[in-house]
Amino acid sequence: MGKTSATGFRRIYNAFFYSMKGFKAAFINEAAFRQELLLIPFFHIIAFYFSQSLATLLILLILPYLTIAFELVNSAIEAVVDRISDEYHELSGRAKDIGSACVFIFLVLTPLCHLLVVLNYFKLIEF
């Protein structure tokens, strides 16, 4: 598929459908993406029930989507690396590992922040 020459609204329209193709590809091909999507309602329930400020609520609502966003970027990196070659190369491994590390940060940060808010709600910690 070559570069598109669409401009204006047509470019935005096309970009929307390319994004939907990306979501579909991730859902079909990436188990981690599906698992993280399943956790979003759980995290939203915690966010709405236990948040005691708008700022806390917004942070807790945004974190799962950042996890998903980094999962998409990591999957894209892996797809490009695998497209280039299936042979091991140090730089390919490094690229995949760094992408995985980005996802890992949010896989730790998201539940940790939710847990801290719940503990604060029950006055088990104060902040």
Image (cartoon, rainbow, N blue to C red):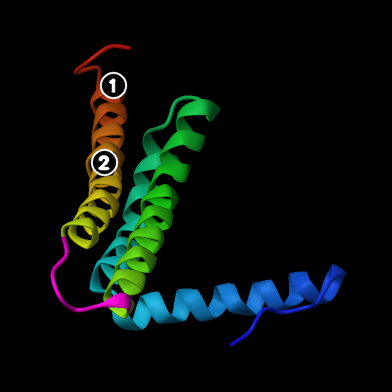
Q: Determine the residue located farthest toward the right in the rendered image.
A: 8
Left or right of 12 on screen, residue 55: left
**60 relative to 82, above or below:** above
Quarter of the image with the C terminus is top left
Residue that mark 1 sits on: 120
Q: Nearer the viewer, residue 87 or 79?
A: 87
Per the picture, the main secondary structure of the magenta-coloured stretch is loop
Nearest to the eye among marks 2 and 1: give it: 2
86 within the magenta span: yes
Q: Is 67 located above or below residue 53 in the figure? A: below
112 and 43: which one is in front?
A: 112
Residue visible at 45% across and 81% down in the picture:
24
- Give the camera-side residue of 126 and 70: 70
Q: Which residue is mark 2?
A: 105
Residue 116 percent across, percent down from the top left: 26, 27
Element under disc 1? helix
Upstream in sequence: badge 2 or badge 1: 2
Instruction: Sort mark 2 into few (<14), some (14-19) or many (20+) by Cα contacts within 10 Å.
Output: few
Disc 1 packing (10 Å; few <14; some 14–19; many ≥20) = some
Which stretch is magenta?
84-89
Query: Residue type at mark 1?
Result: Asn
**Helix, strand or loop under label 2:** helix
In the image, residue 83 lies in the stretch drawn in magenta: no
